[in-house]
Image (cartoon, helix red, strand yellow):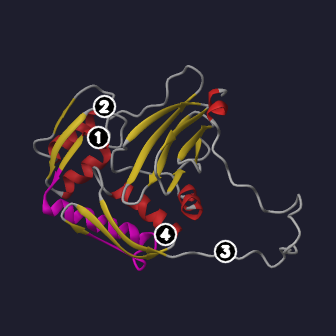
Amino acid sequence: MRLALAALALLLPTLAAARPIDKTFDLRAGKEEFFRAILKAVAVDDPSVAQAELLSSQEVMLTASKPGRALLFLVGDARLDVVRLRVAEGSSKPPAVRATDEQRATVKRACPGFKEEGPDEERAVAVAVSSPTCRAALRELLASDEYSTRRVELNFAPEALVDQLVAIRADLKKRGLDQAMQVSYSGMTLVLKGKATPAQKAELMRALFEEVVGPVLFDDQIEEIVVLVAPPPSAEVPDAGSAPDAGSAVKPAKKAPSKSEKSGK
């Protein structure tokens, strides 16, 4: 889990998000927030804005550092949830990105029957993804703050689904992951196969977010390769009967804060 978390944290920020995110969290700089979830790993794509830590209590601790925007990746057994973090200073409004009239017009031209409704904060979308052109237009529109996977209903034509699979495979090849892992569709479910390290698995999750439009379901059949990290040659190994001294790299495990500690924030 630690390796997967570190790998996600080192990934570069997204240039153009594809799927809409699952939720949006608005945070205040300098504050901490907690929520509970059963996960394998968590990470933020821009640690300068916020950091995330998965505690032993199965709580996620979010620490907001400075105003800005970031993506929080929540990796489960067979799902990838992505949360948009918007950090503001004091009582100011969090930074927001809205869809443009040009983006909506492009989608309406490329996707016949495109419909959306609801308030600007969370708009509902229903559309048939009928072509690669439609899929490309939706990738741009759904990256804005008005949309989340909870209210997006997409029906893929075979041609558009094949286009999406080709895009995922091309992304994996660009990252050097195409030999380690393979992806295919079984109906609307992505089937993941191969052998991969936690770091490679983390990059696969990022590729899925960037290329898949709409909610993603996957059947994870990837065999995880355990990576053993040996101590550096110069490291001194203490005697079996001696305890680590103050300069040792051994640190106690991170404990979840108690309820009284949280309430005293």
Residue 30 visible to the viewer: no
Please state which amino acid type lies under the numbered disc 1.
Answer: Arg
Q: Considering only vertical position in the picture, is 143 above or below 31?
A: below
Please state which amino acid type lies under the numbered disc 4.
Answer: Gln
Residue 105 location in percent, x, y? Answer: 21, 38
**Does the CB distance between marks 1 and 4 fall below 8 Å?**
no
Mark-to-mark CA distance, 3 and 4:
16 Å
Q: Quadrant of the N terminus?
A: bottom right
Query: Residue extending furthest top?
Result: 91
Residue at x 30%, y 49% (from the top left corner): 139
Q: Considering only vertical position in the picture, is 243 above or below 142?
A: below
Residue at x 39%, y 39% (from the top left corner): 23
Earlier sequence position, callout 1 versus callout 2: 2
Residue at x 47%, y 64% (from the top left corner): 203
**Does the CB distance between marks 1 and 2 fall below 8 Å?**
yes
Structural crowding at the residue carrying mark 1, measured as other residues with C-alpha within 10 Å and reported as few (<14), some (14–19) or many (≥20): some
Structural crowding at the residue carrying mark 2, measured as other residues with C-alpha within 10 Å and reported as few (<14), some (14–19) or many (≥20): some
Residue 168 location in percent, x, y? Answer: 33, 65
Mark-to-mark CA distance, 2 and 3:
45 Å
- Judging by the rendered image, the residue that carries numbered circle 2 is 122
> Dot 1 lies on which element?
helix
| Mark number displayed over residue 150 | 1
**Does the CB distance between marks 3 and 4 fall below 8 Å?**
no
Q: Quadrant of the C terminus?
A: top right
